[in-house]
Image (tube, coloured by chain):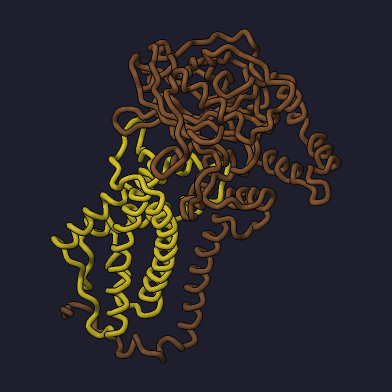
Chain colours: A yellow, B brown
Amino acid sequence: MPSRFPMASRLLHWTMAAMVLAMLFIGIAMVGSLADYHRLVAIHRPLGILILVLVALRLANRLIRPAPPLPLDMPGILRFAAHASHALLYALMVALPLVGWAMLSAAGNPVVLIGAWHLPLILPPSDALYALLRPLHTVLAFVLFATFLVHLGAALMHALIFRDGVFQSMVSWRR
Amino acid sequence: MATDPSWPSEPAGRYSLSTLLAPAALMRLGIIALVLLGVASAFAWTAGWLSPGRLDQVRLIDTFEAVNGAHPGFRRNHAKGVCLVGWFDSSGAGARLSGAAVFAAGRIPVVGRLSIVGPSPEVADGSEAVRSMALDFTLPDGEAWRTSMNDIPVFPVKDAQGFYEQLVALKPDPATGKPDPARVAAFLSAHPEAARAIALIKGAPSSSGFANATYNGLNAFRFVDVDGKATPVRWSMRPVDAFEPEPAETPREKNYLFDALSARLRQGPAQWHLILVIGQPGDPTSDATLPWPADRETIDAGTLTVAAIESEATGNCRDIEFDPLVLPSGIEPSDDPMLSARSAAYSVSFTRRAGETKTPSPVQVGRGR
């Protein structure tokens, strides 16, 4: 029987998958919507911080509970693509919330989560830093969406074409 | 890379090109491609890329720049202004309506900006120019309250579409340098609410300067008290200085309003009362072109003191985004669509000017006169 990801890893993966995908759609919707901008920003900020917390948990979980090994016969180039894309996904899930937090700090805008609950500013107010970080946030978001598409495509390749158990290692609902 | 002997030993070459190119696999590849295309299309639709004609914040600011010319480093609107420094002495009376820290009795530092409406920092002060006061109340625990107010009784348009159409209608005709009367008339007949609002604005007398003007928040907000009870509120800054009408003839000095403000502050701080106007059921909260009845109950929430003004520079009010939705807990947006639209458009304007080379403002405090 093929190896599966541990239950905790699967749970974290699917929870975060839904959150990150929602985040990408909320982000791209809010920068193009006059009517819903505020409502969406009010979700975007706390959700981003929640993702940052969860990705930290997830990295810790991955150290404790390693991923199952890839199939023996998987070619080196595919292995490399798998590991590189996963590393990129992790890096972006850490970087995007941090850049968002930093850019609001540089703008001198309060980082409101819910009600009166605020995060501290992590950069001094600076026009120049904001001008750098704000576009960086957008660029990284597009890279994350592209990487997500590659990840989804690869998962479906494993499921429908290679049929090597890699897809099942993450979708199984059994304990 | 560790390998696991427990993997099923599938037919050799499941990763090979020939496996990929088998007829059944090609069909599955097609399905995968369709799924990816579907997700990417949903993203593009959400982004608005499939409806390029719609009005969004980028188009609004682009139009602003196209109609009014670019003034790099300056705000896209209210470009000409000075920074103010002062404080707010809260009377504590506002706490009846809102649990926001700003309404607890006590003193709160305030920075802000006094400006005239318009896209150019070089424009001459004039009797027609709407004046604005923008404030940033620095509250404990990293909260902030930002508000920008104008010395007009109502806002001329009720939503972003109206604002955009007004912007286009008022575009100066290159031949005359003035808006084309036919386009203005067409706009007003398409927007009777704007025609009514502009009549109210023209009917309200302007004061002689910045220090004796009343600045109105115009948009309604929801004030929420500590028990969670919400009240619709509009607010104004009412001057302590006595109202004086504008002089019949506009002074020639290009910065006469700002010069007069400097002179006024040399005699001592200028003060305003923060007046909260309590809306009654049925009072319009979603349309700032409509005034509320004049007999509405008001609360004097405290006194704003402007101790000094300074020229715009790095690190002062120049780099503050006066987003009307930077609100403390206890003040919430109403159903007025202009609030979200302003927040969205200010963000685009702020991002653009943050990255632009800054030139000194033509209004330099302590020079001129």
Q: Quadrant of the C terminus of chain A?
A: bottom left
The foreground one among A87 and B149 is B149
Q: Position of residue B309 (x, y in %)?
A: 46, 30
For the image shown, how many numbered marks are present on the structure?
Answer: 0
Give me the residue at 64% from left, 15% from top: B244
Give me the residue at 35% from left, 40% from top: A111
Q: Position of residue B266 (x, y in %)?
A: 46, 22
B110 left or right of A32 in image: left
Give me the residue at 79% from left, 39% from top: B187
Q: Residue furthest left?
A: A64
The foreground one among A117 and B186 is B186
Q: Position of residue B174 (x, y in %)?
A: 79, 51
Occupied quadrant, residue A77: bottom left
**Image height check: is A167 above or below B246?**
below
B22 left or right of A66 in image: right
Q: Residue furthest front?
A: B369
Q: Residue furthest right?
A: B182
B367 left or right of A5 in image: right
The foreground one among B211 and A151 is B211
The answer to whether any part of residue A15 appears in the image is no
The foreground one among B256 and A35 is B256
Q: Position of residue A124 (x, y in %)?
A: 31, 45
Q: Quadrant of the N terminus of chain A?
A: bottom left
Give me the residue at 33% from left, 90% from top: B13
**Image height check: is B24 above or below B70?**
below
**Image height check: is B15 above or below B126?**
below
The answer to whether any part of residue B23 appears in the image is yes
